[in-house]
Image (cartoon, rainbow, N blue to C red):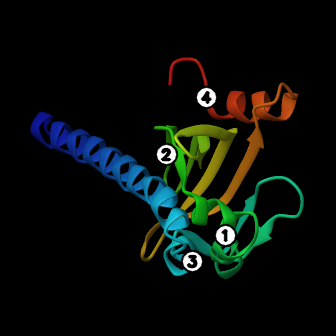
Amino acid sequence: MTDLEARLAALEARTKRLEDQLAIYQLLASYGPSVDSRSGNVTASLWAEDGAYDFGGDPLVGAENVGSLVNIEPHIHYVADGCAHVISMPHIAVDGDAAVATGYSRVYLNQGDHWRVERASANRWELIRTATGWRVQNRVNRLLNGQPEARDLLSSGVKAGD
């Protein structure tokens, strides 16, 4: 391989990593608007068919079930009063056709003339590349309430030198 070929291959690999990260950022950025608009079909489309969402308690399994979360309480009430599901920019580690995104989420609720944080959580998003693009295989969400589960979730997603 010539120097030019090697440089071109390295550039292509870097471009692919950046494109993967951008696609994952776009996917995760779609979550809040989809649930806050109660667009269950859009929410479901973010997940792999057999994907899961564990927010404490019994996980929702299957894209359709995850999408249906927009039609349960307290979510219906939150949207009716005004809410915002906000995902922070996550740390992303791509490994071939799999990726892990680690970060935070907050749910803001409108309370008349002000907003309050209803929920602040640590998140681990496990993603897979499908024929139609990146999809969530598993999302684990744990409240940042001082319990070790949230800290463990965060520390498992970042490593020194990333």
Mark 2–mark 3 distance (CA, rounded to whole Å): 27 Å
Mark 3, mark 4: which one is toward the viewer? Answer: 3
Dividing the picture into quadrants, the one containing residue 68 is: bottom right
Q: Nearer the viewer, residue 127 or 82?
A: 82
Picture coordinates of residue 69, whole percent (x, y): 69, 71
Task: Say if mark 3 contacts mark 4, CB within 8 Å.
Answer: no
Instruction: Give the foreground label among 2 and 1.
Output: 1
| Residue of label 2 | 94
Residue at 51% x, 38% y is: 90
Camera-side mark, 2 or 3: 3
Check disc 3: other Cα within 10 Å, few if <14, some if 14-19, many if 20+: many
Q: At label 3, which amino acid type do we have?
A: Gly
Which mark's residue is nearer the viewer, 4 or 1? Answer: 1
| Front residue (pair 35, 24) | 35
Residue 104 in sight: no
Q: Amino acid at mark 2?
A: Val
Residue named by callout 4: 158
First-in-chain label (2 vs 4): 2
Q: Residue under circle 1?
A: 76
Q: Amino acid at mark 4?
A: Val
Where residue 110 appears, x then y in whole percent? 57, 48
Q: Check the image and report above or below for 66 versus 92.
A: below
Quick one: label 4 or label 1, which is nearer the N terminus? 1
Measuring from the top left, give residue 19's x and y in whole percent. 31, 51
- Tell me the crowding category of disc 4: few under 14, some 14 to 19, or many 20 or more residues within 10 angstroms, Cα based: some
Q: Which mark is residue 40?
A: 3
Frontmost of labels 3 and 1 is 1
Q: Quadrant of the N terminus?
A: top left
Comes first in the chain, label 2 or label 1: 1
Left or right: residue 96 compared with residue 8 = right
N-terminal of the two: label 2 or label 3? 3
